[in-house]
Every structure is written in structure tokens, then in C-alpha cells.
């Protein structure tokens, strides 16, 4: 595989894992508490979120919960 192909594959895997961690870990587990992960599973997801966004997961959760309070109005983040 060429270096460009390897880079494309790594970026695709990174993107898919980022979407998964945002949807499952941040949204379902942290914001709505509908899923509970073992700490050995949650830690790689926390690291992925931090590397991908530079945000602490609790910040994302706070903004998301505020979004639910002010959906489609002036205070909606």
C-alpha cells in the first residue's frame, strides 16, 4: 500500500471512531446516561474526544444539555 493509501486509511478510521465516540460515548452515555461503559472502554473514547476536539467531555455534555433546554430559540448554542 502506498503512503497516501495508508494515510487515507488512517484518516478514515480516525473519522469513523470520532463519529462513534461522539454519538455513543458523549451523546448517549455522558449526556443522556442511557448507556454505561466500563472504564476500560470509556478511557480510549475520552482520549479520542480530547485528541479530535481538544475538549473535555464534560464541556461537550454541558453545551448539549443547554441545547436541549433552548432548542431552536435565541439561547440555543
Image: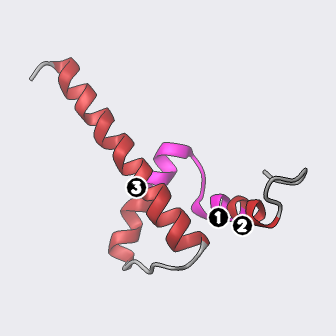
Q: Earlier in the sequence, mark 1 or mark 3?
A: 3
Q: Which residues are magenta?
A: 47-62
Q: Which residue is mark 3?
A: 20
Q: Is residue 45 left or right of residue 29?
A: left
Q: Is residue 16 left or right of residue 31?
A: left
Q: Nearer the viewer, residue 75 or 18?
A: 75
Q: Is residue 13 left or right of residue 43?
A: left
Q: Nearer the viewer, residue 64 or 38?
A: 64
* 57 inside magenta stretch: yes
Name the residue located 32 percent from the left edge and 33 percent from the top edge.
Answer: 11
Looking at the image, the residue that sits furthest to the front is 72
Q: Mark 3 touching mark 2, by CB under 8 A?
A: no
Q: Which residue is mark 2?
A: 65
Q: Mark 2 touching mark 1, by CB under 8 A?
A: yes
Q: Earlier in the sequence, mark 3 or mark 2?
A: 3
Q: Which residue is mark 1?
A: 61
Q: Residues within 10 Å of mark 1 (few under 14, many from 20)?
A: some
Where disc 3 sits, the SS reads: helix
Name the residue located 88 percent from the left edge and 54 percent from the top edge.
Answer: 75
Colouring method of the image: secondary structure
Amino acid at each position: 500500500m502506498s503512503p497516501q493509501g495508508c494515510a487515507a486509511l488512517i484518516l478514515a478510521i480516525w473519522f469513523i471512531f470520532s463519529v462513534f465516540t461522539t454519538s455513543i460515548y458523549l451523546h448517549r452515555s455522558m449526556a443522556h446516561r442511557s448507556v454505561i461503559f466500563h472504564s476500560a472502554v470509556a478511557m480510549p473514547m475520552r482520549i479520542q474526544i480530547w485528541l479530535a476536539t481538544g475538549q473535555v467531555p464534560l464541556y461537550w455534555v454541558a453545551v448539549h444539555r443547554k441545547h436541549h433546554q433552548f432548542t431552536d430559540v435565541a439561547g440555543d448554542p
